Image: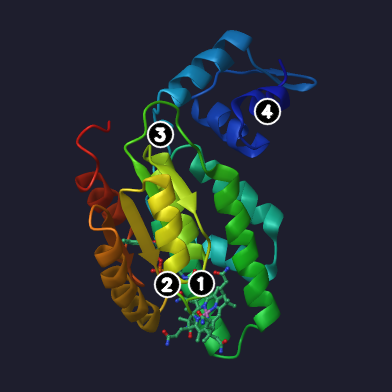
Amino acid sequence: MQLRDAAEALGVHYQTAYGWVREGTLRARKTPRGYEVSENDVRDLLARRAAGAEPSSQVQVRDWAAQAGRLHAALVAGDEARARRDFARLAAGVPLFELCDHVIAPALRRVGTDWAAGELSIAAEHRATAICDRLIAAHVRQPQGRPRGVAVTTTPPGERHALPAMMAAACLRDDHWQVHDLAADLPAAELIGLAAETGASLIVLSSATAGGGRLAGREATEIREALPGARVLTGRPGDTLSRLRELARASGEPGGR
Ligand code: B12
């Protein structure tokens, strides 16, 4: 089959499948019409991904700062095609949570600094965030199999920075959690209601500012009183998804994976 069809069957963007071909994860034959892939190889890769295997880490990222710099340049220029191309190449060999920690977050921090310095308009900053939103959405996976548990992700009331919660949701999904992502700025009572209804054992409150972090701390106390069985984690600017993954795993249900 053609690589484009293989990408569809694998549920990934064409550029991701192309990245796998380039780094050898997916065998392909170059033909005048493009790349041809065997259906058996696609089935094998599907099975490996369904079993939760990470894409092979054959992409050696030696210089994260350079990758973040490239993304920052594409974001500032509004060059979504370039951002997608570069990101898909990296995502073929590096787990999404690492790309969020080492590439997207640093690039966005620079966008924030540019905006605060008056070098970037609010419109351009919104465009940059929206591109990151789509980069993450295009690469989220939900491996099959028994989940570790049910998690809810959101931000505390008043915190409108939605991206860290979206990153937290993507990271946990990738790590076999069933996640209900409630986006940003949700009243505590709503969150508590949904967490109780879904039997969530883990609640994650993300924030992108120190003030948001304080709000999250207060809300966490309220949630713990209402749902004593649930573990509540709060994320602050500069925290990493790799740490979130560790903390979440440590709180996993004994009966889970
Ligand atoms: C995009 C953006 C916006 C967008 C958000 C849109 C969206 N869909 O998210 C909009 C336009 C809404 C916005 C609004 C505002 N913003 Co703003 N924004 C940003 C920007 C550029 C990126 C935000 C972001 O996603 N950061 C997340 C990443 C990049 O950083 P991070 O927090 O370290 O993320 C990691 C952790 O959170 C971790 N993680 C996530 N969850 C969890 C959970 C756990 C448990 C753990 C361990 C880890 C973890 O994962 C991430 C990846 O590593 C930042 C710049 C910056 N430095 O962040 C400014 C920034 C945060 N904003 C800022 C400001 C001032 C504002 C406004 C007040 C502007 C205004 N006057 O209206 C409002 C406030 C709105 C509100 N009430 O919340 C300032 C805050 C300064 C401060 N005092 O702290 C910043 C820092 C810009 C700056 N340099 O001045 N903003």
Secondary structure found at label 2 = loop
Q: Is mark 1 within 8 Å of ligand 1?
A: yes
Left or right: residue 110 versus residue 62 is right
Helix, strand or loop at mark 4? helix
The residues bearing labels 1 and 3 have C-alpha atoms spaced at a distance of 39 Å
Q: Taking 116 as reference, is 73 above or below it?
A: above
Residue 139 numbered mark, or none:
none
Around disc 1, counting alpha carbons within 10 Å, would you say few (fewer than 14), some (14 to 19), or many (20 or more)? some
Is label 3 in contact with label 4 (beta carbons under 8 Å)? no
* C-alpha separation, residue under disc 4 versus residue under disc 1: 34 Å
Mark found first going from the N terminus, 4 or 1? 4
Q: Determine the CA span between mark 4 and mark 2.
A: 37 Å
> For numbered disc 1, what is the local secondary structure?
loop
Could you tell me which secondary element the residue under label 3 belongs to? loop
Residue at image mark 2: 156
Q: Is residue 209 above or below residue 118?
A: above
Crowd rating for badge 3 (residues with CA inside 10 Å; few <14, some 14–19, many 20+): some
Q: Quick one: label 4 or label 2, which is nearer the N terminus?
A: 4
Mark 1 or mark 3, which has the lower sequence index?
A: 3
Which residue shows up at 36% across the image and 34% down it? 147
- For label 4, the residue is 8
Which residue is the site of mark 1? 185
Q: Is 243 in front, or is 215?
A: 215
Question: Which labelled disc corresponds to residue 58?
Answer: 3
Q: Please, what is the three-letter code of the amino acid marked with disc 3?
A: Gln
Q: Is residue 15 above or below residue 111?
A: above
What amino acid does circle 2 point to?
Answer: Pro
User: Where does residue 220 sit, x and y in percent of width and height?
Assistant: 30, 69
Front label number (4 vs 1): 1
